[in-house]
Amino acid sequence: MVVGASLSGLMTALALSRTGWQVTVLERAGAHRSSSAALAVDPPDLVDLLGDGMASTVLSYLAQDAADVSAGLPVTWQALHAGLLEAADQQASIRMQHRTPVVQVGQDAQRAWALTNTGQTHTGDLLVGADGYRSLVRSAVAPDKPHARYAGYVLWLGMAAERDLGPVRWPSGLEIRYSGDHLLLGYPLPAPNGSRAAGTRQLGWAWYDATRSELFRRAGALQGNVVQRSLRPSDIPEPTYAELTAEATRHWPAPWAQAIADAVARRAVTATPVSEYAPDRLAAGRMVLVGDAAHVPTPMTGGGFAASVADARTLAVTVADPDGKGLRSALLAHQAQRLGPARKLVQSGQVFSRSFAGR
């Protein structure tokens, strides 16, 4: 069983199915999800993880999203997720169950189990927690350290279409801008159909903001130092939208100020308090953590996706025996290989967080 069908969960399910496992994926959300996030993908890593067949399915989706994926151009989270989901749907050994929230997990000597909100219990030899930074499975694997902690700043995300911005300077690649307690990452993206022709493209932006913690506390998105949730566009107060437009003009040059103003005008902005989690353990009995359930670096490291690929690859190799013989030892071997690199990645991001947010 894999709890969670975001990027790490889907990659892990595909990698396990490739080595002979029958996999049930339990995901609380629907199949179609949207995000303004973008990331760089290394095609050889996907081929190594998934094999030529499954990787070609994923890369076909990315080819629609970027003219040359191998050049390191960013692709949208949404395109990558759609490609991984299509590859999973093509595997007879993977059973996807969307809109199936898991409310409790457990294990004994013979099996692991996951209880859903409808009262149904799923059982299996292995339970993988790929359920993100607020992981339920983490509470079972590491009950003494169950929560990711607030890094001291928030992240606003949005995207704008070139046709809506008028004549603007078009960036050639990722741009990073600092302005006091604010930092902006801006990145050009192709049109939804993959075109990079002038007038059809998109601008994505990620605005790190160390000034608005109290807004998120008042909204209940932060409780103490634990992040509870993101803010959807409808959750963001109208005065905050006006502040973002004014501050974008003050802090950022073209075309980023225009892209932010456009997204704000459409109320197409999401925001989340940034979490960090440096793990002390990744496995317990028949349970193991991957992706953001296992380690939560600030997105500023740029290494979260690559770490999730490494998690899926290492786990698939160490538990390649589909009968589960020696499973506990295999999961401890996985932990031995992944714990050090995961901690190092998170800690590298914490250096930035302390500098940026004064924590």
Image: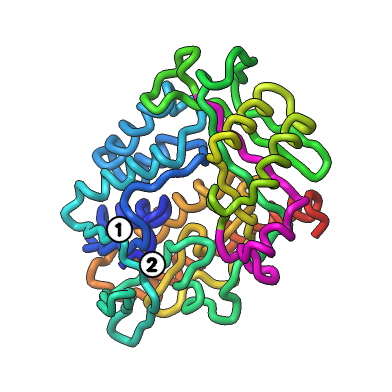
**Does 183 appear above or below 271?**
above
Alpha carbon of mark 2 to alpha carbon of mark 1: how far?
Answer: 11 Å
**Corner quadrant of residue 194:** top left
Task: Tell me the quadrant of the picture where the N terminus can be found.
Answer: bottom left
Q: Tell me if label 2 and label 1 are in contact, CB under 8 Å.
A: yes
Q: Secondary structure beneath disc 2?
A: strand
| Residue lying furthest front | 238
Residue numbers of the magenta segment: 202-229
| 2 or 1: tag closer to the N-terminus | 1
Q: State the residue at coordinates (72%, 56%).
A: 350
Q: Can residue 345 be spotted in the picture? A: no
**25 or 71: nearer the viewer:** 25
- Residue located beneath label 2 in the image: 128
Judge from the rendering whether residue 107 lies leftward or rightward of residue 37; answer left or right. Answer: left
Q: Choose mark 2 or mark 1, whichever is in front.
A: 2
**336 or 214: nearer the viewer:** 214
Q: Residues within 10 Å of mark 2 (few under 14, many from 20)?
A: many
Q: State the residue at coordinates (46%, 66%).
A: 289
Q: Residue 314 in magenta? A: no
Q: In the rendering, at what x and y percent does residue 323 appear?
A: 23, 71
Judge from the rendering whether residue 252 lies leftward or rightward of residue 232; answer left or right. Answer: right
Task: Tell me the quadrant of the picture where the C terminus can be found.
Answer: bottom right
- Residue located beneath label 1 in the image: 16
Q: State the residue at coordinates (60%, 17%).
A: 170
**139 or 181: nearer the viewer:** 181
Numbered mark located on residue 289 in the image: none
What amino acid is found at the position of numbered circle 2 in the picture?
Answer: Val
Q: In the rendering, at what x and y percent does residue 354 appear?
A: 79, 55
